[in-house]
Amino acid sequence: MSATRRQVLARSGALGAGIAFAGTISEIFAGTSATAHDWGGEAGYGPLLPDPDGLLDLPEGFRYKVLSREGDELRSGQGKVPSNHDGMAAFPGRDGRTHLVRNHENRVDAKIRVPAVKGLTYDPEGLGGCTALELGRGNRVLGERVAIAGTAVNCAGGSTPWHTWLTCEETEDRAGTNGYTKDHGFIFEVDPYDPRHTSPEPLTAMGRFQHEAIAVDPNNGVVYETEDAFEKPFGLFYRFLPKKPLGGRGSLHAGGRLQAMRVPGVKDLSAVQETGTTFDGIEWVDVPDPLAKETAIRFQDFGPKGITHAQKLEGCYWGGRCVYFVSSFAKSAEGSAADHYGQIWRYDPKHRRLTLVVVFGPDTDLQMPGEEPDNITLAPGGGLMVCEDGEGAQHVFGLTKRGKVYAMARGRQNIGTPEEPEWGEFAGVTFSADGCSMYVNCYTPGTTFAVTGPWR
């Protein structure tokens, strides 16, 4: 959708009318305790009210607190809050505290780098990494520090069953490229509670490629990984079989086996357009060279049957007995087999079965959030929260189990001009353990919000 149309919809109040999609939306809530709420026939919490401070529009009764902004001083005294706030997770602490770990998707041109801290820095020339916030009751900021530094393009990641954060580098630059002194394209494990338990050493066995997100099977410790490659051949969907499954903090450093998914007879997932399409007998093929010493993994030789690719593989999460992953879009003009504005796939490891459960566009009314679904989190009161990553006005949308969509938040920080406004995308939406606070980032200018109110 064009920026102009989005702005017209936002001004007219048409946003909130709903979204057309194909598929059974309840599929993406599998295994959760969420219930289907219509709340008297209306989804959501009412219209968004303009924020007089020009930061964040919310429904009546809700309020926000700015926890952190790029350029402010870190409470630890280690430097300034870095730029480009991206993926994030919340972890429960003692005495009602919450610990946030926040990615910074910094490339070589980042405005403010993650400060290089002794003992927490992988590559001194890497400007990305993570910061950690400790929050007390009422979301009072008790501490803010560097969690890991010297990494690059930290986009998304995922949490583990043992309460650590796996931060993912969305790059495959080698040492000597862009001034880096070490190879990049890895996953790193970050402890949200104590920096002494974080090692700035990559989990090399989990592969070197343009990582996006991960999800851990809580039953056997298998880690699923998505790859957001920017050019054809596009990314792969992986699984990592650890030598020490569910071994706790640091156990992934023991190594394991990396495999890529092969869907028999399917070279490109975008070619599949009909929801409910199911493939049995999914194959997992060992990656020839996980470190990509000579050739990027997606270019490597997987045998005469080849391997299955997909454009823009992003979100990944575990639900019930299955792993779900998102392809944000596919464009034939960029090399995909067909076009779509978002797919959600479900993989059932017990039955080795892959199913296309939801498709967005391109023949649907793309009001919201019908293009480029990105960061997704399960909301404790039922449903999902989805970060929009498109053009024009930027929202956090709620999605009920009955498929009703509502606007939960709208960014108001104009990074364009009065004549041609632009807004930074949302990222990293997550909830506190008690479900009373929603945390979300504005990517640019980097801002972390806590949203509280009459959550149902």
Image (cartoon, grey):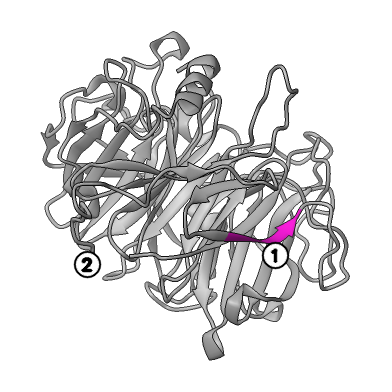
Q: Residue 45: x percent and y percent?
A: 37, 52
In the image: residue 404, left or right of residue 384: left
**Quarter of the image that includes the N terminus:** top left
Q: Residue 185: x percent and y percent?
A: 61, 45
The question of residue 104 being in magenta is answered with no
Which of 29/235 is in front? Answer: 29
Q: Which mark is on residue 200?
A: 1
* 359 up-or-down from 437: above or below: above
Q: Secondary structure at mark 1?
A: loop
Q: Is residue 246 visible?
A: yes
Residue at point 64%, 43% (across, down) = 443
Going by the numbered disc 2, the residue's amino acid type is: Ser
Q: Are marks 2 and 1 in contact (CB under 8 Å)?
A: no
Looking at the image, which residue sits at the far top? Answer: 333
Distance from the alpha carbon under mark 2 to that under mark 1:
36 Å
Q: Residues within 10 Å of mark 1 (few under 14, many from 20)?
A: many
In the image: residue 237, left or right of residue 185: left
Residue at point 13%, 42% (across, down) = 281
Which of disc 1 and disc 2 is earlier in sequence?
2
